[in-house]
Image (cartoon, helix red, strand yellow):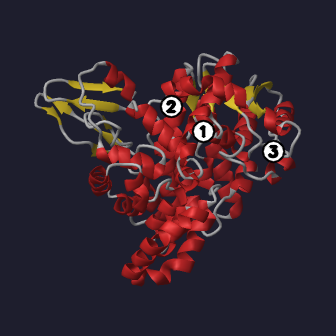
Amino acid sequence: FGIKPLYYSDNGKTFRAASQVKALLAGRQVDTAPDAAGRVGFFLWGHVPDPYTFYRGIHALPAGTCLWIGEYGPGKPKAFCSISDLLVQAERSAVASKRSPLAAQSLLRASLLDTVQHHLIADVPVGFFLSSGIDSTTLTALAAQVGGTLRTVTLGFEEFRGTDDDEVPLAEEVARSYGTRHETFWLTRDDFEQVVEKFLDAMDQPSTDGVNSFFVSRAAAQAGLKVAVSGIGGDELFGGYPSFQQIPRMLRMLKPFRALSPINRALRIISAPAIRRFTSPKYAGLLEYGGSLSGAYLLRRGMFMPWELTSVLDPDLVREGWRELQTLDRLEATVGAIKTTHLKLSAIELCWYMRHQLLRDTDWASMYHSLEIRVPLVDIGLLRNLAPLFAAPTRPSKRELAGTPQRKIPNRVLNRRKTGFSVPVRDWILKSKGHAALETQPQAANRGLRGWARMIYSHFSGN
C-alpha cells in the first residue's frame, strides 16, 4: 500500500536510502536539480506522485516494489504486490463463490475485528483519532469490544463550537458510550498562524493537504500518546468519497463525446480563458477529459489542469514533466483488467490519492511529533478478505461497516453528513498571511487551494 515511504539516491559511487527526502538532502551529496515530473505532478495533483520527488537525484521506491543493490549498484524496482491485480483476483473469486448477506456480514465483522486486534498489539497505550464519522467510530467500537482501557482524541474548532458542524459533542458522546478515556483539543485560526512556518518546515515533500494530520498528531502527542489509530482507508474501500457517485455519472453523460476528440480539444482551448474568470477551469475540459475514467478522475482530483501548467511552471519543464508522468496512461493502468465500477474507483483512490497524499502527509506529520500512526483499514490481509464482497452486486456500504461492532453505533453518527477537508481549515489556509501575499494576482489564478499550492511550491523552491 505504501504506508511508509522509502527514498533513495545513487550518484554512481554511493547508494543512499532514507525514510524522508530531508534526510538525503541533509547529506548534501545528491543532485538537487529540479525534477520535471515531480514538479509538474505537484501542481497537477497537489502532491508528488511516486516514483518522483522534487529533485532529480532522489527517487521514491514505489509501493509494493523492492530494489536489489549488488556490487554493480542498484537494479530496477520489481513489483511484489499489485493492488490492481489483487482486485482482479477478487472479482474472479466473487463470481466463483457467492455469499448470502448474512455470510457476507459475518465475514466483514470477523475481518475488521481481526485487523483491529492486530493493530492494538503494542508495549505502550494505543490511542484512537475519534471524529464523529463512521470509520473512526467503528474502529473505536471494535477496539472497545476487544477489551482494555481505550484512549481517544478529538480535534475541535472554535469557529464551529455550538454549530451543526461541530464534531466534538457527538465524538464525546461516542467516547462515553464506549467508556474511553477521552480528550478534546480546541483549535483556532491563531493556532494555525502561529505554527504555519513550523508546519511547512515539518513537511517532507510538498503537499496541499496535511494540516489536519499535523494538528491531530500534535494533539495525540500532547495527550502523551506514542501510538494512535486512524480511519484512513475506509472511504477508499466503502465508497465514501463523492468520486464514487460523480465519476460514473460523468462517464455516462460524456462518453458519447469521446469520438469528437479534436473538436472537444478545440472547444476547451477557446472556452478556457473565459470560463476560468467565473468558475473552476475544470469545466472547460469536461468534453475533452470527462468521457474516460482516467480523464474524469483527473478532473475530479486534479488541482491545476494540464493546459494550465504553463501558467505556474516553465513551458519546457512542463512538456518534459507531462511526457515523463504519462498521467492518463498510468491511471488507466491502475484500473487494468478490473471490471467492477466500484473496484475500479477503489483501485484509483487507494493507489493515487490515499497512497500519494493521505499516507505521505500522515507519515511526515506523525513522525514530526514522534508519533506512530496505525491504519487498520489499510491492510493487505483485510483487502484480500473483503475485496470479493465489494465485487458483488450487493456490496457492503458504510452502513454495513457501522453494523459490525457488537454494541450499536449511535444513530446520529450514521446520519451525520460527511465534512472532510473543508472549513475552517480551508478558510485558515485561504486567509493565511502567506496566501494573502498572493492577492496581487488575478483571483482566478488562486481559486480554491491553488494559491496555497503556489505558496508551498515557493517554500520548497527557496523563492
> Considering only order in the chain, which callout, 3 or 2, is on the residue closer to the N terminus?
3
Q: Position of residue 371 (x, y in %)?
A: 57, 22
Image quadrant where residue 155 sits: top right
Looking at this view, is 461 or 187 the one in front? Answer: 461
* Label pair 2/3, CB-CB below 8 angstroms: no
* Label pair 1/2, CB-CB below 8 angstroms: no
Looking at this view, is 433 or 256 the one in front? Answer: 433
Give the CA distance from mark 2 to mark 3: 27 Å
Judging by the rendered image, the residue that carries numbered circle 2 is 363
Q: Residues within 10 Å of mark 3 (few under 14, many from 20)?
A: some
Q: Position of residue 332 (x, y in %)?
A: 39, 64
The image quadrant where one finds the C terminus is top left
Which label number is shown at residue 436?
Answer: 1
* Residue at x 63% of width, y 35% of height: 432
Q: In screen coordinates, is 147 left or right of 32?
A: right
Looking at this view, is 123 or 347 the one in front? Answer: 347
From the viewer's perspective, is residue 120 above or below residue 159? above
**Secondary-structure class at tag 3:** loop
| Kind of residue at disc 1 | Ala
Q: Position of residue 439 (x, y in %)?
A: 58, 44
| Kind of residue at disc 3 | Asp
* Label pair 1/3, CB-CB below 8 angstroms: no
| Kind of residue at disc 2 | Asp
Q: Residue furthest right?
A: 162
Q: Is residue 5 visible?
A: no
Judging by the rendered image, the residue that carries numbered circle 3 is 165
